[in-house]
Image: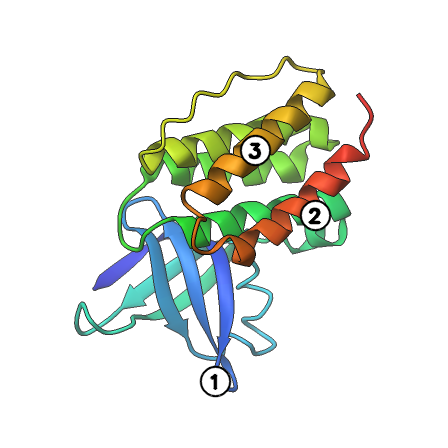
Amino acid sequence: MQLRAPAIVCAARPHGETAVIARMLTAESGIVAAYVAGGRGRELRPVLIPGNAVEADVRSKSESQLPFARVELVTSRGSWLTEPLPAAAISWITALTAIALPERQPFPALYDALRALLDAICVAPSARGWALPLLSYEVLLLRELGYGVPVSRPEDGDWGAMLATFDRLGRELARYPLADRRGDAMGSRVLLRERLARIHG
């Protein structure tokens, strides 16, 4: 495997003393897992924050071998991780993407949607500016994976309906793509739901 492409960091798990196994979403190759030497070090740790946009150079000698990757930071989301609502949203959508999508299957629509959603979370003045796009991303992910869940779009400004749709989609995500691994990601969604509920309609 040889790939050099823009990517979105979706997960970074420690490996050994200094390395990281990063799961990154690319437009052409979907989720790619790769070994990043020194990923826990001072220079690369801020680069491998979930939500960050990077330029990834991924290489392996065979299809069965875990690729090695070098990454360069393009856009950092680190400063938003100190804000409770954006941090919870970024944590949830990157965890969902990392866990639900199979490796090395292209999902270009999801890549574009995730990039746009992350931009919205970091630019909008409040969660009202990105809550519906987040729900749209969840619906798109379900549909891209073959789960046609009919969900009506809440009216803009109807916060109660938005939360009700959020709850319904949560049940569908737990039932289908996260059925065997819901504990790994749904905790992030529960935290996001609690923080969204504090916003009054």
The amino acid marked with disc number 3 is: Leu
Residue 199 image position (x, y, % from top left): 80, 30
- SS under mark 1: loop
Q: Residues within 10 Å of mark 2 (few under 14, many from 20)?
A: some
Name the one closer to the observer, 88 or 115.
88
Which residue does the image show at 40% across and 41% down from the upper left? 111
Q: Colour mode? A: rainbow
Crowd band around label 1 with a 10 angstrom C-alpha radius: few (<14), some (14–19), many (20+): few
Residue identified by numbered label 2 = 191
What whole-number distance in Å separates the C-alpha atoms at marks 3 and 1? 34 Å
**194 and 71: which is toward the camera:** 194
- Looking at marks 3 and 2 on the same chain, the residue that comes earlier in the sequence is marked by 3
The amino acid type of the residue labelled 2 equals: Leu
**Considering the image in quadrants, where does the N terminus appear?**
bottom left
Question: Between tags 1 and 2, which lies in front?
Answer: 2
Camera-side residue: 71 or 8?
Answer: 8
Task: Report the number of numbered marks.
Answer: 3
Point out which mark residue 188 bears.
Answer: none
Separation of residues labelled 3 and 2 (CA atoms): 15 Å
Horizontally, is 178 left or right of 191 in the view?
Answer: left
Nearer the camera: disc 3 or disc 2: 2
Q: What amino acid type is highlighted by mark number 1?
A: Gly
Q: Which residue is mark 1?
A: 16
Q: Which residue is identified by label 3?
A: 134
In the structure shown, which secondary structural element does the residue marked by tag 3 occupy? helix
Q: Between 10 and 197, which is closer to the camera in this rendering?
A: 197
Return the x and y of residue 139 as percentages of the image width and height. 46, 30
Residue 42 appears in the rendering: yes
- Relative to residue 135, is residue 112 drawn left or right? left
* Residue 47 lies in quadrant: bottom right
